[in-house]
Image (cartoon, rainbow, N blue to C red):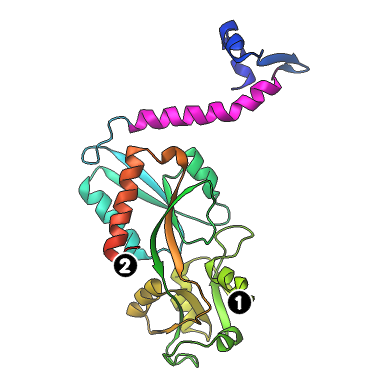
Amino acid sequence: MGAAQGGRQTPLTRKALGDKLLVKGPVGLTLTERAMVLQGPIREILLQLSALDTEAGFDPVTDQRTFHVGCGDCVLPSFIARIIDRVTTQNRRMQVRFLTINPSFDSATALETGAVDLIINNHPRPREDLRTSTLYTDEVVCLMRQGHPLAEGRRLRLARYLDADHLAPNPSARGENGPISGSLMRSGYRRNIVATIPEYSLVPFVLLESDLIFTTGRQFATELVRYFPLEMVPAPTEFEPLRFYQLWHERKHNSAANRWLREQIRVVANSQFKPV
């Protein structure tokens, strides 16, 4: 609702809302306090009406649409590939676009406005007003080059882990710790991070040229060990398991298309990982 809409306001609308909505100000018409309060709820109603219109008659076999999924860089590449395959093979007119989550990406706003349909991530504290569903959990392990002094196969003791130099990803959320550092800090410890990287794809190349270690989930580490001369060692027992989940906004909860997408992702997760 904006001042420019004043010419289209009717006495009936003002009477129904019990307010003039627009009054004359120094530079033209301006919103009343009542109108400003109503802006948020009206915007939400319009968003829901728009969603109802686009969801009417959704058919996963014949519908043509593009799903937008926000995705943490930590999510397993093979998992993403299987999601794409499952969605697009059921309907060749369907597309899936994955968007990277970084500190400049406002996940809550993107979900609320419909810029993304859902998010897949492992951030330890998703917003409580958003819907979540756990996809899988993963054991924490350490990656390092073959021949590394700590590449002995046995689980790392906490003291040796804290004494090592670490490689870590850049934070995906501004001013917040990720699941690895957060888990350590809740136990009262802090690791020595000497370098950070913007993308997980850089991890093996940095590890192969250094004595740094990288802490991640077993699933991700297993894929890298398959293609690079790296060693995977169980992390100290102080680490909590990583939880990967899908996250969506309440206004999409009953959306037929969003429910269908969530179910496809759940099916893929259950087939690739141990069901939770």
| Direction from residue 124 to residue 68 in the image, left or right | left
**Most frequent secondary structure within the magenta stretch:** helix
Q: Is residue 50 magenta?
A: yes
Task: Give the structural element (helix, strand or loop) at label 1.
Answer: strand
- Check disc 2 and give the amino acid type: Lys
Residue 98 in the image: x percent, y percent? 40, 53
Q: Which residues are magenta?
A: 30-55
Residue 40 in the image: x percent, y percent? 59, 30
The quarter in which the N terminus is drawn is: top right
In this rendering, which labeled residue sits more in front, label 1 or label 2?
A: 2
Which dot marks residue 274?
A: 2
Numbered circles on residues, count? 2
Q: Is residue 179 above or below residue 23?
A: below
- Check disc 1 and give the amino acid type: Ile
Residue 100 vs residue 59, the one in the foreground: 59
Which dot marks residue 193?
A: 1
| Direction from residue 130 to residue 256 in the image, left or right | left
Q: Is residue 21 magenta?
A: no
Asked whether residue 82 appears in the rendered view, the answer is no
The quarter in which the C terminus is drawn is: bottom left
